[in-house]
Image: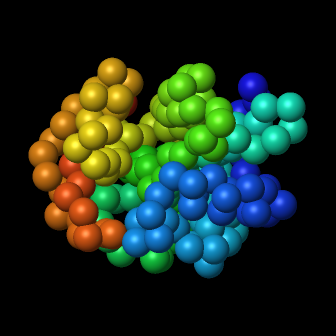
Amino acid sequence: MKIRHVRSTDLPALLDIEHAGFSPAKAATKAAFENRIATISDTFFVAEVQSQVVGFINGPVIDQPYISDDLFDQTQPNPTIGGYQSVLGLAVAPSFRQQGIARALLKALEKDALTHERQTITLTCEERLIPFYETAGFTNAGVASSTHGQVTWYNMVKPLGGSL
């Protein structure tokens, strides 16, 4: 497996993986992916197996410890140093799940976040995914204010040297 920064040519594979992992109400749109690729490719990683994109992780660096719903529609360029590394999307193609790819993508994002002196990695997840993120070093910070996709989300935070 190889982890690298996203390329615009990855878009069709990213959309396939996104729609396999998320309901239409929760899935990022093609326009959102195009915006993220153009704006935050420095914090948008893909996993490849035999030159096939099999997973991805992405999110902008934000100036607050938790994700807000406006981030799903508006992406700003990342600062070089500091801030909070968010995760707006982490998904793996169905036939490649349970092989450590999601965890490897989280590690790649964490390594990049440490290099750029981010305070935390922050994300929201559904209740069923809390144990996965806890085993990856995240702490459950309670129910999020997000109403994205009309589900209950939980704030998950992994400190990287700064404090909340």
Q: How far across and down, in percent of the image, does residue 148 sit? A: 31, 69
Residue located at (12% from left, 46% from top)? 142
Instruction: Describe the colour scheme in one phrase.
Output: rainbow
Picture coordinates of residue 17, whole percent (x, y) = 63, 53
- Residue pictured at 63% horizontal, 74% vertical: 30
Looking at this view, is 1 or 99 the one in front?
99
Q: Is residue 57 left or right of residue 143?
A: right
Location of residue 163 in the rendering, given as x and y in whole percent from the top left corner: 22, 36
Is residue 8 visible from the viewing direction of this image?
A: yes
Can residue 64 be spotted in the picture? no
Pick the quarter of the image with the N terminus. top right
Asked whether, in this view, residue 57 is left or right of residue 68, the answer is: right
Left or right relative to 19: residue 3: right
Residue at x 44% of width, y 50% of height: 87
The image quadrant that residue 55 belongs to is top right
Q: Taking 126 as reference, is 50 above or below it?
A: above
Q: Residue 76's x, y, as percent?
A: 51, 70
Single out the residue that lies furthest toward the front.
95
Give the answer, above or below, for where 122 lies relative to 60.
Answer: above
Q: Residue furthest left?
A: 142
Relative to 45, is 64 above or below? below
Q: Nearer the viewer, residue 69 or 126?
A: 126
Quadrant location of the C terminus in the rendered image: top left
